[in-house]
Image (cartoon, rainbow, N blue to C red):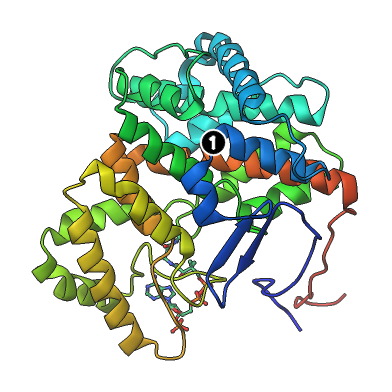
Amino acid sequence: MTNAGLEGVVVADTLISDVDGERGKLVIAGADVEQLAAVSSFEGAVSLVLAAGSGTPGSGLGAAATGAALGAARAAAWELVPRLGDALEHVDGMDALRTALAHVRSTGGDPGDALAVIGAAPVFVAAWSRRRAGSAAIAPDPKLGHAADYARMTIGAAPSADAVRALDAYLVTVIDHAMSASTFTARVIASTHSDLISAVVGGVGALKGPLHGGAPGPVLDMLDAIGAPDHAEAWLLGELAAGRRIMGMGHRVYRVRDPRAAVLETAVRPLASPRLALARAVEQAAGKILRERKPDRPLAANVEFYTAVLLDAVGLPREQFAPTFAVSRVAGWSAHVIEQRRTGRLIRPASHYTGAMP
Ligand code: COA
């Protein structure tokens, strides 16, 4: 029988992360996501997932050495920016990132390639974002933290300490999520013994779709269209009547609220976003309507719901939300590529032919 969505099919043993969809728990390299987002920088989380992917959990480079390596990788990527020309102009951010990452030179080994692409992603996304807004791209500062430098390269000024903390919490929270569609894509590519950069470029392609990473921009559009809590119910009913889905709600694996929604809702608080109260009201109204419409299928807020509020409060334009997801997830994909290469087999499922026979 065909299982088109591959639900419940286990394709890998992994040390990198675990999702419990029934209980709403996410563990990343041995730590609860709530705990990791509260205490770790993105650099620390990168060190953890790469060590886990390498089969040596707990013994990575550490946050400081990873941060230094990522700073050097950002500087190296900046050298490529002038050569990218039109690749960063007049295109969607995910298309720009996909094209730009393909220009990263392989270091000849997975750990080096991983740091090169993780370092390059924010440089390319920020350069694309600046050019899109008609401004000059800003060079990275290798001495800064990854989140702080990404925000600075985008906004053009030093971000507040609260904004850096919130962005760091976001980047840590979405760094990995078990066998997501983009992670599976990256692992399929790695399973053919192709290179890490190709696998990561494939991951960007899978993440781009609105059913995966493309939802947070539309979530912000939805909040804008609703405007005030009183309008939420009528607007949401109109969407469903038109046959559209409510963005930021529902998940393939979670049957309760996505734990990352709570982490991001907490992380955004110090930024005093004017949209937070509205987002909470819309989430409540959407939850109620979807419970009535689909009593057998729990549909609660997913990570994208509060991603939209957080990244907006940090000062990133909504077109940059999906690429910012990739700026973090590139680390998870890289860890999975390393793990796949270490432990996996060629991934080659079967299909059921329904056409004519000769
Ligand atoms: N709004 C309205 N209805 C939804 C819905 C949503 N956000 N998510 C799922 N449903 C409905 C589907 O229409 C379907 O109804 P049907 O059986 O009458 O056709 C039912 O719930 C089951 O959905 P299904 O498509 O089988 O779920 P899935 O596991 O394939 O999809 C998502 C998971 C995330 C793709 C889906 O919930 C979705 O499209 N959400 C909105 C986009 C989004 O937020 N993406 C970010 C994900 S992190």
Vertical side of 70 occupied by 310: above or below: below
Total numbered circles: 1
Q: Position of residue 120 (x, y in %)?
A: 57, 24
The structure residue drawn at horizontal position 77% and vertical position 29%, both measured from the top left corner, is 111
Image point (28%, 34%), residue name: 315
Task: Classify residue 93 by image quadrant.
Answer: top left
Quadrant where the C terminus lies? bottom right
Q: Is residue 331 visible?
A: yes
Residue at 48% from the left image edge and 38% from the top image edge:
94
Q: Which residue lies under the disc numbered 1?
A: 42
The answer to whether residue 103 shows anywhere in this view is no
Q: Nearer the viewer, residue 274 or 244?
A: 274
User: Which of these two is toward me, 307 or 242?
Assistant: 307
Q: Amino acid at mark 1?
A: Phe
Q: Residue 46 at what x, y percent from top left?
A: 63, 37
Ligand 1 near label 1 (Cβ, under 8 Å)? no
Q: x, y percentage for residue 231?
A: 11, 69
Relative to residue 225, is residue 71 depicted above or below?
above
Q: In the rendered image, which quarter is residue 100 located in?
A: top right
Q: Quadrant of the N terminus?
A: bottom right
Question: Does residue 123 appear left or right of residue 65 in this picture?
Answer: left
Quadrant where ligand 1 appears? bottom left
**Coordinates of residue 328 in the picture (x, y in percent):** 54, 39
Q: Relative to residue 146, is residue 35 depicted above or below?
A: below
Write the residue at 81% across / 41% down.
54
Q: Nearer the viewer, residue 290 or 45?
A: 45
Which SS class for mark 1? Answer: helix
When the figure is inspected, residue 179 is found, relative to residue 61, above or below; the finding is below
Image side of residue 202 versus residue 217, left or right: right
Front position in the image: 283 or 106: 283
